[in-house]
Image (cartoon, helix red, strand yellow):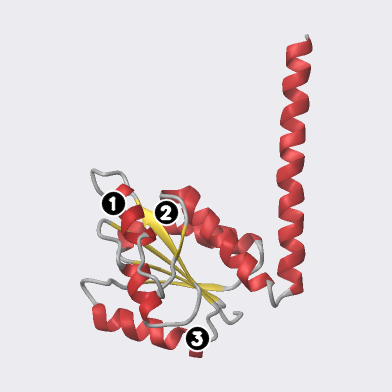
Amino acid sequence: MPQPVVSIVMGSDSDLEVMREAGKALEDFGIAYEIDVTSAHRSPDRTAEYAREAAGRGIRVIIAGAGGAAHLAGVIAAHTTLPVIGVPIPSTSLQGMDSLLATVQMPAGIPVATVAIGKPGATNAGILAAQIVAMADRAVAEKLVAHKRKLARGVEEKSAKLRASLAS
């Protein structure tokens, strides 16, 4: 099994359905990853240790998903110099808006790249992590170019189909 270069972590195993989307995106680019649970509030010492040790284990990017108060990405970012991508999880009656604001409103000096709420955000977190990894990995960079071309082809196909249906 290849050494993971991206770490996906979530505040609770109930976040797994959303965070699996980040893993799927990484798999599409052939990027090895690990996945785990740690909590900024329920296991703060474990979370700090996880963050401090990640780079030494070969991790290059951390994707952190959390709902509610959603402090996980920020706490991790406070303990590492690795890039951290926060995924807000829609886990409360506020449908993830609380998570989004908690993740995106980091103080100057402790950046967390924040993506959209839920599964689309987790997918984008995986793609963003791939873009970061691609800075030093030509094979991943080439897969990203192919991914962009595939997206463009999909739009062209939908456009042609729409124009054809309107012409008839």
Name the residue that disc number 3 marks. 55
Give the spatial CA distance, label 3 vs label 1: 29 Å
Give the number of marks.
3
Contact check, label 2 and label 1, Cβ < 8 Å: no
Look at the image and tell me in which quarter the N terminus lies: bottom right
Q: Nearer the viewer, mark 2 or mark 3?
A: 3
Give the residue drawn at x 62%, y 66%: 130
Residue type at mark 2: give it. Answer: Val
Task: Answer above or below: position of 157 versus 126.
Answer: above
Residue 36 x %, y %: 39, 72
Specify the amino acid type for callout 1: Asp
Q: Image point 44% across, 59% down: which residue?
A: 19
The residue lying toward the viewer, choosing from 4 and 70, is 70
Rendered residue at 71%/68% (across/down):
140
Q: Secondary structure at mark 3?
A: helix
Q: Which comes before the other along the chain, label 2 or label 1?
A: 2
- Dot 2 alpha-carbon crowd within 10 angstroms: few under 14, some 14 to 19, many 20 or more: many
Q: Which of the pair 100/125 is nearer the observer?
A: 100
The relative height of residue 142 versus residue 115 in the rendered view (above or below) is below
- Kindly state the secondary structure of the residue where label 1 is placed: helix
Q: Local crowd at mark 1 within 10 Å, few (<14), some, or many (≥20)?
A: some
Q: Which mark is residue 5?
A: none
What number is the disc on residue 98? 1
Residue 23 on image: x %, y %: 52, 62
Numbered tag placed on residue 18 in the rendering: 2
Residue 48 sits in quarter:
bottom left
| Residue 58: percent from left, percent from top | 55, 85
- Kind of residue at disc 3: Ala
**Spatial CA span between label 2 and label 1:** 16 Å
